[in-house]
Image (tube, rainbow, N blue to C red):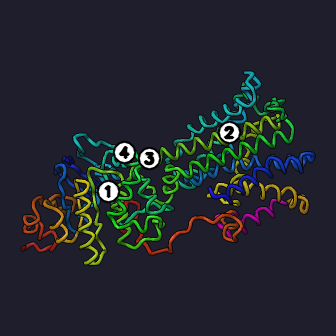
Amino acid sequence: MLALDDVSMNFGGVAALRNVTFAMDEGETLGLIGPNGAGKTTLFNVISGVLTPSAGRLEFAGKPLGKAANWRRARQGIGRTFQIPQPMHELTVRENLMVAQRFGAGRTDGRRIDEILDLLDLTAKQHIDAAHGLALTEQKALEVGKALAVEPRLLMLDEVLGGLETATKRAFGQTLQRVRERYGLTMIVIEHDIETIKTLCPRVVVLNFGELIADGTPDEVFNDARVIRSYTGDSAA
Amino acid sequence: MTMMRSGLLLGFLAVAYLGVPLLFGGMDYVMSLVIAALTIAGIAVAWALLGNLGGLVSFGHAAFFGVGAYVSALLVMDNGWPVLPAMLAGGLGAAIASVATMPALRLRGPYFALAILAYAHIFKILAVEFSSITGGAGGLLSIPGFPTVFGLDLASKTGAYVLILTIVLAWMAVYHAIRRSTWGLALRAMHDSELATRVVGVPSTHLKAVMLVVSAFMTGVVGAFNAHQISFLDPEYAFSGTWTVLPIAAAIFGGYRTVWGPLMGALVVYLLDQLVFKEIMPSGHQLVFGVLLGAMILLSPQGLMPLLARLGVARPRRETAPQAAAPHATEDGNARA
């Protein structure tokens, strides 16, 4: 479904990603973790076309992504959220989903929008100004909703549970599981909460200073000495 | 559309198409002023469409006005085209000319505004230099006027009024239709959240380009109307900054984010200036207009129509929920450090 081959991203002299290589199968859910500044969001930006990689190749659904613009990648089936919610200003919650569906999926289907709103518990808020009328959990839900309205094959979630209280986080995590089951999506999840990662992701990739340092099951990576060192900074670990 | 809104619209159309000609049809000076105000309104609607939906502030609409005027006049004078189709061709010419300005779409904010201003000057220079076609600095004289259609002499003041009124209302209908479409939603959303729209598949640069072309077409037709109405054209006049400044002032005064704002702004601003301020202060009356515009920006930055809505005179905008604090995001959606 998705393959990255030697992908690097440099910002001037700073290497945000260094020769990252991994592949994902259709229907797989991958946890992407790493300390702050590890390059996780940069990797999302590269996959979704917000950034053009300095080097390397990306393939999606068997085709090279090349330098396709971010809006084209959405149309190819790559949906993403942002760490800080980015609602479309001046639009209601429902209108946000309508635009995403119309342009991303290339069709208009009110029933699918109703379903997404219901799944994300946003039905009561559908006519609210998306930029100013939502609580943080609802803003996060809208991020997921917009990405789903695109009708993606690959859904990339960037810390959608970040900043939420534990109980809310648990409930929202269950919602994400329902989303995955309902639409049979391939997912990449950036998340700092280890329990969430263990629950959602059978496979975890770890980045540190832009380098892929581990790739395996949650148990394997969380017991990997390099991963522990990357988080603790403890060279003796 | 509610019964009340339909009634108001019908009332407006009755006053505009019947009331004004009946009341002022014999007063050439007043009709000339109303026609001039509507000419400005036509450009103001086109400018507002680009500003509100395309998110682009243009200082160069004079370019499209001038190109439309020249194309239409030349098609009629040199190629024997009938005036009304030539006016549409004038709009098409302006739309094609707008393609030349598209590299400026890579620029944002004031940089776009200044770049497109430069294009207006380039078109003006071209009109002067290609004198064998355009008549050069001397311009074109005796441009044929409007024909008679269904017994209405469009070359008369009343006929010209009906024609420009119809053009302006048609442009408002286009503005309204685009604004209400999914395209309109995406265009409105693009201003403050371009990245958010792009990652869901909105080709924002393409949409801006389409709005630029549509806006240029509208302005070109208005320019063509003006050329056939006054029967004269020269580069200094056709590409004058007046065709940029007055429509912008009218659109901002009336409320460029509303469909009716540019029309109301043009009527109020131009007619007040010409009928009232000019009488009181024959020289320097534009100062009063400047003060009025400044006051409006301070009092109601969104313009006259939203102000009237707040006062309960016009239809209010859609209610939004109380504001909730949202975290601030950088361009790529990450938290600001």
Q: CA distance from mark 1 to mark 3?
A: 16 Å
- Tag 2 residue: B220
Quarter of the image with the C terminus of chain A is bottom left
- Please name the residue shown 84% across and 51% down the image: B19
- Binning the other alpha carbons within 10 Å of mark 4 as few (below 14), some (14 to 19) or many (20 upward) gives many
Q: Which mark is residue B203?
A: 3
Q: CA distance from mark 3 to mark 2?
A: 26 Å
Chain on which label 4 sits: A
According to the image, label 1 marks what residue? Answer: A80
- Whether residue B111 is visible here, answered yes or no, is no
Highlighted range, magenta: B285-304
Q: Amino acid at mark 1?
A: Arg
Residue identified by numbered label 4: A72
Q: Amino acid at mark 2?
A: Gly
Determine if marks 3 and 2 fall on one subunit: yes
Type of amino acid under label 4: Arg
* Earlier-in-chain disc, 3 versus 2: 3
Assess whether residue A150 is covered by the magenta stretch. Answer: no
